[in-house]
Image (spheres, rainbow, N blue to C red):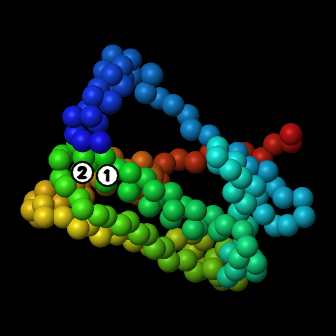
Amino acid sequence: MDAAGLRAMQAPIKDKYKTDAKAAFITLKAKGSLDDTNIACKVETGRALAVAGLHPATGGSGMELCSGDMLLEALVACAGVTLKAVSTALEIPLRSANVSAEGDLDFRGTLGVAKDAPVGFAQIRLRFDVVTDAPQDKLDQLLKLTERYCVVYQTIKSGPPVEVKLQRA
């Protein structure tokens, strides 16, 4: 897809949202159910069932997906799609691009071994390796706009309020 095709595809959507802001507010949902026999949660992805379990560093077998890995994978997916959309819109030719994310965890926190150890990622690093002849100022703009429009990156960076409830079914 080129820039004109992207604009043509998104123009009616953008016009709708400009005239009806409420139409742009959509609630995304995820569901899962606890496994009956293992310490695992079966997450419905819309295309398949993803089974998440304990990371081997917390006693897991490594056979199930780690939710920390899934968070990084969601960041890579969103950032990659955003980078591609922005490079297309700005007509910045990328011969190839790879996206990677790393996150540092101290598993003492989640295991309750050390009360001073944080639970969650202490740091996340997102990296783009691109092959392009575009000038550096264009690449700087590409990175700035990718950061600005990547939903998962902005969510992690900004830390929105999260409401948690426990109720009987």
Q: Residue 158: x and y, percent?
A: 41, 53
Query: Residue 109 location, x and y as percent?
Result: 64, 77
- Gap in Å between the C-alphas at discs 1 and 2? 5 Å
Q: Amino acid at mark 2?
A: Ser
Identify whether 62 is placed above or below 150: below
In the picture, measured across the screen, residue 88 lies left or right of residue 100, that is: left
Q: With respect to residue 115, does 158 lie above or below?
A: above
In front: 11, or 116? 11
Query: Tag 1: Cα neighbours inside 10 Å, few (<14), some, or many (≥20)?
Result: some
Q: How many marks?
A: 2
Query: Horizontal placement of 61 versus 35: left or right?
Result: left
Q: Residue furthest right?
A: 37
Q: Quadrant of residue 22?
A: top left
Q: Which residue is mark 2?
A: 87
Q: Work out whether residue 156 can be spotted.
A: no
Q: Is residue 136 left or right of residue 103?
A: left
Per the image, label 1 sits on a secondary structure element best described as helix
Q: At 24% across and 46% down in the image, what residue appears?
A: 88
Residue 53 place in picture, x, y as percent: 73, 67
In the rendered view, tell whether residue 139 sits above or below residue 115. above
SS under mark 2: helix
The C terminus sits in image quarter = top right
Tell me, yes or no, whether the two marked residues, 1 and 2, touch with CB atoms within 8 Å.
Answer: yes
Q: Which residue is mark 1?
A: 84
Up/down of 152 relative to 99, above or below = above
Q: What residue is drawn where x is 38% and y is 56%?
A: 79
Which residue is at a point 51% across and 31% down the rendered structure image? 26
Q: Give, as a three-letter code, the residue at label 1.
A: Lys
Q: What residue do we see at 67% from left, 82% from top? A: 57
